Amino acid sequence: MNLARTLSIIRKEMWHILRDRRTFLLVTVSPVFLLLVFAYSMSVEIRNVAIAILDYDQTTLSRRYRDGLASTGDILIRYWPEDYAELQIRLERRQAKAAVVIPAGFERDLVAGREASLQVIVDGTDPNTANHTITHIGGYTQGLALEILGEALERQGVSADQLAPIDLRMRTWYNPTLKPIIGWVPGLIAIVLGMPAVAATLALTAEKEKGTLEALITTPLRRSELLVGKLIPYVLSGLVSAVLCALVGVYLLGAPFRGSPFLYLLLSADFFLAALSISLLISVFVPSQQAAMVCALLIFLFPGFFMSGLFYPIASMPPEMKMEAYMMPTTHYLTITRGLFLKGLGMSSLWPFALALLVMGIVVTGVAILTFKKRLA
């Protein structure tokens, strides 16, 4: 091997990397990006799980129980519904991951030495968070709660030894068995349906590499006509994939589907509009298929897997990570698929996420059209 010729090749490739900004970013910045994503994802602790408390008792002891439940930081009491219907709405819309119902007579039963009851309702669509919440509430109620309540009762002349254990009645909604696969299937569907968007990044870059973009440029086609014409076929093919994924999830993997099939297709099209608009924007700026594919994977696959709420609740993420998560179409679509499959929700509950996807799709498509130049560089 000739050392001089080898050094010449090394020098040429170094200049290529330094002069080509896209190659430089892919070679140097993308590993750092992935490291940050993986590090953030693997270090996230499940904390500040939002719960709702419906206190029918409204006594000193029920308030002491509520305050102690939220004192560790693992549980965040965010909602105080006035009735059971409002409590159900909080759970359906994923605003609360669990709810505690303190019945009337809670203090009276404890003071009298009778067994007092508490009801805990847990959203089972996210098994990891559900198990964490059950463990925390159950352990606190049977341990620390009795200690705090016992001290309060002893001041009233009742010995803590006379306290009867609390009857903690756990109910898990939407996924009663807490099987991980039931909660993961709708979320994984949201992840894998990002692959049409990855493929769509080749829509313009393939034309650039093959030289066929020149023929399109010479036609009277407008920029909007060209880009939208490339987007629509991917939306349609993505809907076919969405149907196939739903069939596999229900009939092969055993996930329930409780929502409207029509609404599922409509909101899937909404998701594809948002995701594919990002793909078009990538293909406008990236000249090669390989670079476009790498960029799409960095945007859709890896962050979608770890930052969309599939494994870790978004509420437990750092603020900067939350901002990135809500900027991804997959985050909103994952909430939609879980709501449709496991909860049977309608548009009245899912419209904020559908609107976020629609706005994202329209804005990014507009940016792609404005930045696309109908001429060769």
Image (spheres, grey):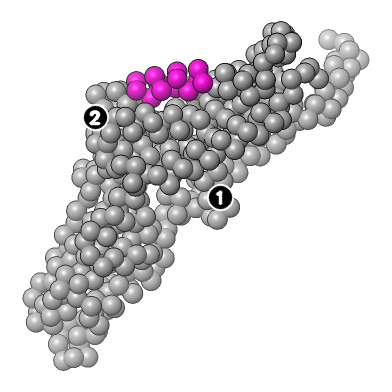
Q: For the residue carrying disc 1, how many other residues have a C-alpha within 10 Å: few (<14), some (14-19), or many (20+)?
A: few
**Residue closer to the observer: 195 or 336:** 336
Is there any visible trace of residue 150 in the rendered image? yes
Which region is colored magenta?
Answer: 232-244
Labels in figure, total:
2
- Which residue corresponds to the image point at 26% horizontal and 23% vertical from the top-left? 252
Q: CA distance from mark 1 to mark 2?
A: 33 Å
Examine the image and state in which quarter residue 264 appears. top left
Examine the image and state in which quarter residue 17 appears. top right
Q: Position of 234 compared to 239: left or right?
A: right
Residue 15 rendering spot, x and y as whole percentages? 86, 25
Q: Position of 345 compared to 12: left or right?
A: left
SS at mark 2 in the image: loop
**Badge 1 is on which residue?**
323
Residue 245 rendering spot, x and y as whole percentages? 35, 24
**Badge 2 is on which residue?**
254
Q: Where 22 falls versus 6 (above or below)?
A: below
**Residue closer to the observer: 56 or 138:** 56
Is residue 235 located in the magenta-colored stretch of the structure? yes
**Residue closer to the observer: 41 or 301:** 301
Examine the image and state in which quarter residue 256 appears. top left
User: Magenta stretch mostly in which secondary structure?
Assistant: helix
Amino acid type, label 1:
Met
Amino acid type, label 2:
Gly
Q: Please say if the residues under marks 1 and 2 sit with CB atoms less than 8 Å apart.
A: no
SS at mark 1 in the image: helix
Q: Looking at the rendered structure, which numbered label has been put on residue 246?
A: none
Quadrant of the rendering where the C terminus is positioned? top right
Instruction: From the image, state whether disc 1 or disc 2 is nearer to you.
Output: 1
